[in-house]
Amino acid sequence: MEKIAKDVGDVQSRLIDHRPVIQGEIRFFVREFEEKRGFRENRLLENLNKMVMETNEQAVPKCSDTMHEHLCEALTRLEAANHMAQRIQQRGLEAQQSTRLQACMARRKVDWEEFMKEQGRNKVEVDEEHAKAVGRLSTRYSEMKKDLAKFSHF
């Protein structure tokens, strides 16, 4: 009888008190979650490490070589452009130092000054002619206005 009471007590405690079972299930769930999460994070870290290694081994040297080639080409082109600019500058200096060119420049300067004086004279003539034409037109219109005033009284 004692054994039956004990068994009934055990059955009753199992039916009413679920804490030990729930705690076991919680421990199992947490252990599974941590293991799966750990594996997933571990796989992600391994994949990232693999990508970084591939980049360091393949992409970086390739980019470095390409950059070196293009920089050498750009440097060569810049040197050629610099040489051309120096030649152009040298030719300009030589041309300025040339006495023949200086004589031509002086002659052009005198010609320009004469041209500008002539333009000034032409401007004065045109202004005078314009003033005379304005005066004639003013006189004519004032005469026409007087004539019109005479006929408007009729």
Image (cartoon, helix red, strand yellow):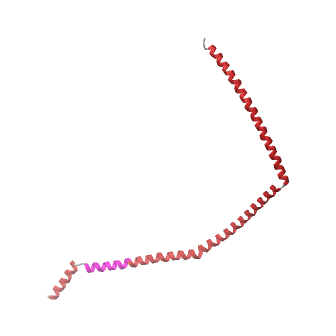
With 17 as the anchor, is 75 left or right in this view? right
Which of 109/48 is in front? 109
Image location (x, y in percent) of residue 41: 44, 76
Which of 81/67 is in front? 81
Q: Is residue 89 above or below residue 28?
A: above
> Which residue sits at x=57%, y=75%?
56
Q: How many marks?
A: 0
Q: Which residue lies most toward the bottom here?
A: 2
Image location (x, y in percent) of residue 27: 32, 80
Which of 70/137 is in front? 137
Q: Is residue 110 above or below residue 63?
A: above
The stretch drawn in magenta includes residue 99: no
Image location (x, y in percent) of residue 44: 47, 75
* Magenta residues (range): 19-33
Image location (x, y in percent) of residue 49: 51, 77
The stretch drawn in magenta includes residue 22: yes
Characterize the magenta stretch by its predominant secondary structure: helix
Q: Which residue lies most toward the right here?
A: 100
> Which residue sits at x=15%, y=88%?
2
With 48 as the anchor, is 77 left or right in this view? right
